[in-house]
Amino acid sequence: MFEENIKEYLEKHGFGTFAPKAVLFDMDGVLYDSMSHHARAWHESMRHYGLAMTEEEAYEHEGMRGVETIQKLAKAQGHQEIDEAKAQEIYDYKSALFAAQGPAHKMEGVEELMRAIVADGLLIGIVTGSGQHTLLDHLEQEFPGLIFKERIVTAYDVTRGKPAPMPYLKGLEKCGAQPWEAIVVENAPLGVRAANAAQIFTVAVNTGPLPDHRLLDEGADLLFRRMTDFRDHWHDLSSHFNHQSK
């Protein structure tokens, strides 16, 4: 199982080995079942500032830095160009609406998956386009012994967010890994595109309402419908790693 997925990944990028020593997780919709909260907050905040974004469209933009999302929407909708400061004001408003909805629950199966990854000797990194302090500030406490601040990449660490590869390249740097030495876990089309551009083996877990092909078309190397499915198949995947190359 998964031999063909790995073979296709190696051929696609011209690599000779697949020897993961780090797994880079997105946050919203991967660590936390938080995307419905974000979708509502995006819809309401955009409406408040005279912009339009349906809740479903929030999933299409997921992973991009909030400020970039706002500037892109404003331009596409024919509004006057929004500078960084104004976009940050709008994003802060959106963040307040998100926080007011209360904490999001951990995604079922993700903590057990992480423990299996760490037991196999791999590092865990987090690569998110979020700047939501209400979630970011608690990652280490909510995932003790699994997530560490020095291996977290947020919107504040990069100048170009997803779908550019910069966030995942930064994640590789923080984990001391090359592209063929890592795995990305994503749930969003733009995140998958970013990981694919960084040449990292990408596992898409479709926890949202978008059709599977949206993730596969962006370059996902493997797809699961639920995080629990990935958890249950982790050892099937890890059995194909080239451990001698670590």
Image: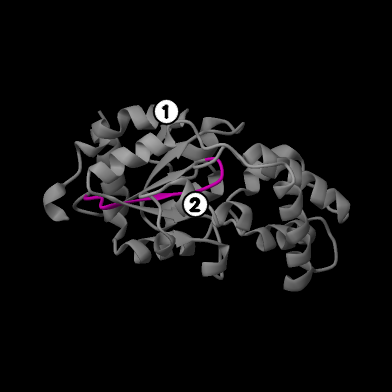
Badge 1 marks a residue whose secondary structure is helix
Residues rendered magenta in the picture: 19-29
* Mark 2 / mark 1, whichever is N-terminal: 2
Q: How crowded is mark 1: few (under 14 residues within 10 Å), some or many (20 or more)?
A: some
Per the image, the residue denoted by label 1 is 228
Q: Where is residue 233 in the image (x, y as percent from the top left)?
A: 31, 29
In magenta stretch: residue 40: no
Question: Residue 13 in the image: x percent, y percent?
Answer: 31, 53
- Residue 65 in percent (x, y) is at 62, 59
Q: Which mark is residue 139?
A: 2
Q: For the residue labelled by badge 2, is the local secondary structure a helix, a strand or a loop? A: helix
Main SS, magenta residues: loop
> Which of these two is toward me, 122 or 2?
122
Residue 56: tell me if it is visible.
Answer: yes
Q: What's the residue type where badge 2 is placed? A: Leu
Q: Where is residue 146 in the image (x, y as percent from the top left)?
A: 37, 49
**Screen quadrant of the N terminus:** top left
Q: In this view, does 114 lie to the left or right of 242?
A: right
Closer to the camera in the image, 189 or 227: 227
Quarter of the picture holding the C terminus: bottom left
Rendered residue at 61%/40% (across/down)? 104
Nearer to us of marks 2 and 1 is 2
Left or right for 128, reference 209? left
